[in-house]
Image (spheres, rainbow, N blue to C red):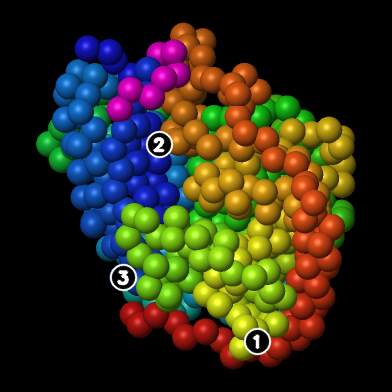
Amino acid sequence: MTKGVLALDLGTSMVKAVLVSADGEILHHSQAPVSFSNPNGVDTASLWQLVAKVIQDLLAKSGGADSVQAVIATGQGDGLWMLDKDGSPSPEAFLWNSNIGAESISKWEDSGAILRHFRATGTVLWPGTQAALWAWLSGSRPDLAKAVSTVFCAKDMVTYMLCDEIATDITDASIPFLKPGTYQYDQSEINALGCSSISKLLAPVRKPGDVLGVVSESAALSTGLAVGTPVHVGALDVVAMLWGSGLRQDGDVLAILGTTALTASVTKNSSWDGNPVGATISLPEQGQSLRAMGSSAGTATLEWFLGLNGLVGETRHERFWELVGLSPKGNEIFLPYLSGERAPFLAPHASGVFLGLTTESTIGSMGRAVVEGITMAMCLGMDHSLFENHPSGSLIVLAGGGSLSPQWAQIVANVSGRTVVVDGRAHLGALGVAGLVIGETGEIATTKEISLRTFSPDEHHEKMRLRYASFQEAINSVSPLWRKAAPRKEPAA
């Protein structure tokens, strides 16, 4: 039996368990979709049951608990994941893409707190950050807030359930309260945002890869893992994917077409005196951080369009691209901000907009506009800050589920005007955190070492750049309406 590191990947739409060997090969994997009945949150008990089932399924494939030498987790960041006074997960957690903290963001923006926080941390707060969600929870659901004993992130809750130890890591802790480049929270920033009540609830900050604890008896009964199996501190999924692709050098860029359309670049810059855009994540490497532009748009926006038009099932994407290919290239433009926007501009009340619809518009032509809109939202992040201080030859790697479509990868090249290398390997995040445990005993293949598809701007590039300019003009035209938008309805208590 070949042993390996069990890497858990707790995504917004999928939970995965991946067994990685000592030489960085994927031995077995199991996954299951996450279903949220509440668009703003998740039932934590159901999520833990799903995690346990995925682990059980993987162990059934790998030969049992003896195949696992250690466990580590990565996952979605931000949001509000909590333990109650008894040390049990709060029944409800709130996600990074929740918009219920929008009113707090609006107030902080009006008072200048958003700009001041950016100058101190390099991060523009958005509704789904711990700060905005805690401000909302404290004001709207004070009984729940008073019952909280710990606040951390998704992966932290799962590792707590595995080993009964509380911790987060430097990458997840970066947003919103960490002093950049340190393992300490900034009390002045906490107080400035009116979140002093969260101070004693924040989890201790650890280095990714550290041993956190061992699998407990109760977790062993739930998952099938062996009691005493080491559990390590993980990292934010974006950072894990970066590591999985081998991107650790200053100027390296990762673009992800996932639930969020995100671009991120490694940098040593620690001065945030430019335009207030995006987020900054501290990395364990001394002096390095990750500048991230995570649009609220992403593949979830495409899934909305597919479901709206009856494109469901395992072949839905193939059918979608067939319809796109059969449709004439029209002039439709789509602003993909169904859940507001957070980077590279902050617009909590932004909404989706179709422009250029005519009687000749079809599902295919509108679908093309949806994909282009998601791509353009992602590329705005690149253009606004990621390349300001980086060499023109920086490697750009495209990953995530959307990158598996060659049509979409070509659109990214045409909109960005840059050559992209598609790292379509599954489980990049799992590989990235597994490498923390494997360390010097093994080697994870990287984007720079394996043969992958490359896409460069083609004959449609110039036309696409013109559409990209129209996309930006449309945002400027519509954005005044977003600022006047009525607050979104809060979820019922």
Residue 289 lies in quadrant:
top right
Above or below — where is 269 with respect to 374?
A: above
Q: Position of residue 346 (x, y in %)?
A: 70, 69
Furthest toward the top, the residue is 441
Residue at 59% across / 74% down in the picture? 366
- Secondary element under disc 3, as helix, strand or loop, is loop
**Eye-nearest disc, 1 or 2:** 1
Query: Mark 1 sits on what residue?
Result: 358
- Give the Cα separation between the discs numbered 1 and 2: 48 Å
Above or below — where is 66 with respect to 38?
A: above
Asked whether the beta carbons under mark 1 and mark 2 sit within 8 Å of each other, the answer is no
Residue at 59% across / 21% down in the picture? 450
Residue at 83% across / 66% down in the picture? 466
Q: Is residue 57 left or right of residue 205?
A: left
* Label 3 packing within 10 angstroms: few (<14), some (14-19), many (20+): few
Residue at 24% across / 33% down in the picture? 58
User: Which badge, 1 or 3, comes first in the chain's sequence?
Assistant: 3
- Residue type beneath disc 3: Ser
Query: Mark 3 sits on what residue?
Result: 37
Query: Mark 2 sits on what residue?
Result: 73
Q: Is residue 44 left or right of residue 372?
A: left
Q: Position of residue 142 (x, y in %)?
A: 40, 75
- Secondary element under disc 1, as helix, strand or loop, is loop
* Label 2 packing within 10 angstroms: few (<14), some (14-19), many (20+): many
- Give the Cα separation between the discs numbered 1 and 3: 35 Å
Please provide the residue range marked out in magenta: 22-28
- Residue type beneath disc 1: Thr
Question: Residue 333 — which label?
Answer: none
Q: Position of residue 190 (x, y in %)?
A: 61, 59
